[in-house]
Image (cartoon, grey):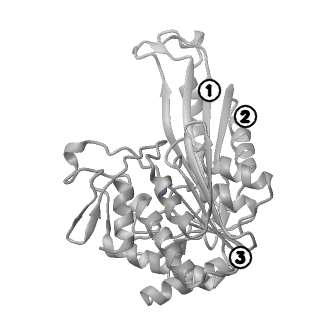
Amino acid sequence: MSDVIALAKDLIRRPSVTPLDEGCQTLMAARLERLGFVIEPMVFEDTTNLWARRGTQGPLFCFAGHTDVVPAGPLDKWHTPPFEPTILDGMLYGRGAADMKGSLAAMVVATERFVTANPDHSGSIAFLITSDEEGPFINGTVRVIETLEARDEKIRWCIVGEPSSTALVGDVVKNGRRGSITGDLVVRGVQGHVAYPHLADNPIHRAAPALDELASTVWDQGNAYFPPTSFQIANIQAGTGASNVIPGELHVQFNFRFSTELTDQAIREQVEALLTRHGLDFEIKWTLSGQPFLTDTGELLAAAVGAIESVNGQQPALLTTGGTSDGRFIAPTGAEVIELGPVNATIHKVNECVKAQDLDLLADMYQGVLERLLA
Ligand SMILES: [Zn+2]
């Protein structure tokens, strides 16, 4: 069994459901400390984070990731116990195998190999590891970045190990992410008897044309890296349950995934203007969960494309699709950020798995990036 697989199994064995870490970071820190990393645990409330750095000079290269996993779900649907890593037909099964303990193992082993071969490498290498990525993202990467910013410690290049690949490890590099903003809208009417509509004011009837316009609006056309901005209603609720009551309020929750063609401010203004134009009596609460970012050129992307090509014999596609990642907290500091990790077909599902061999290839790619940037 390779070093990478052995470490991945050790990590999967620890049931670190968000926000628990269950000793995963201690295990990683022990390996890094042996290489000369300075270990700095950063504990905020219920969340354990690890900042580890080797070297004091710039430029600073950082591996970012998370030790927490989503819950296993129904145990009877798993063919093998979720926290007993098992290799079957070349696939490594277990919660976190793909998202993202396999990547963490590949990062550590790649760093061990690189540092052993290049003990006097240029710049610095760091690990920014949280146990809060799958949860409310309050005390994880956000707080670590705040701490680093406060002492002016700047990351130049960052690889987030999220499972970016589609069919073959390294076939896709995520070089940006869409922004995400949620609106919680309350439209007020006047509750009454359905038989006496002139004494009531139905907020569903009032809001329906506005919602229709929101859903049919073309927000932008996207650009070379981003698909067009999408608006989706996620939840809608009104009514008392009785068939003879006009409701007094309508609650709608919707989310935008937006490209770098738009800003959250532009979205807020456009939506509120539309609701006002429809004459609605409304209140809206906005939650911004991430600004869009894009790393479309630069040394990091070139190094990653080169490293992947030398392992796979083909270049990766550069995409910005999919959900958000902690990259959204790191990119605003000015860092070049990309995501490179294993195939994401089974993440968050029962029987999560990853091709065991892919983790070895991923370690080769990570090592190739370090060699290109810091050797
Ligand atoms: Zn993840």
Q: Which mark is residue 187?
A: 1
Residue drawn at point x = 56 percent, y = 12 percent? 191
Answer with mark 2 or mark 1, whichever residue precedes in sequence.
1
Question: Residue beneath label 2, please?
Answer: 276
Indicate which label's residue lies in the foreground, 3 or 1. Answer: 3
Indicate which label's residue lies in the foreground, 3 or 2. Answer: 3
Indicate which label's residue lies in the foreground, 2 or 1. Answer: 1
| Spatial separation of the CA atoms under disc 3 and disc 2 | 54 Å
Residue drawn at point x = 44 percent, y = 66 percent? 105
Q: Position of residue 356 (x, y in %)?
A: 31, 71
| Spatial separation of the CA atoms under disc 2 and disc 1 | 11 Å
Q: Secondary structure at mark 2?
A: helix
Tell whether 113 sits left or right of 45.
left
Question: Residue beneath label 3, please?
Answer: 123
Residue drawn at point x = 61 percent, y = 71 percent? 225
Tell whether 58 sits left or right of 351.
right
Inspect the image, locate mark 2, and give the three-letter code of the amino acid beneath it: Thr
Crowd rating for badge 1 (residues with CA inside 10 Å; few <14, some 14–19, many 20+): many
* Residue in the foreground of this view, choosing between 83 and 338: 83
* Residue in the foreground of this view, choosing between 87 and 355: 87
* Residue in the foreground of this view, choosing between 363 and 56: 56
Inspect the image, locate mark 1, and give the three-letter code of the amino acid beneath it: Val
Image marks 3 and 1: residues in contact by CB distance under 8 Å = no
Asked if residue 116 shows in the view, the reply is: yes
Q: Position of residue 111 (x, y in %)?
A: 53, 74
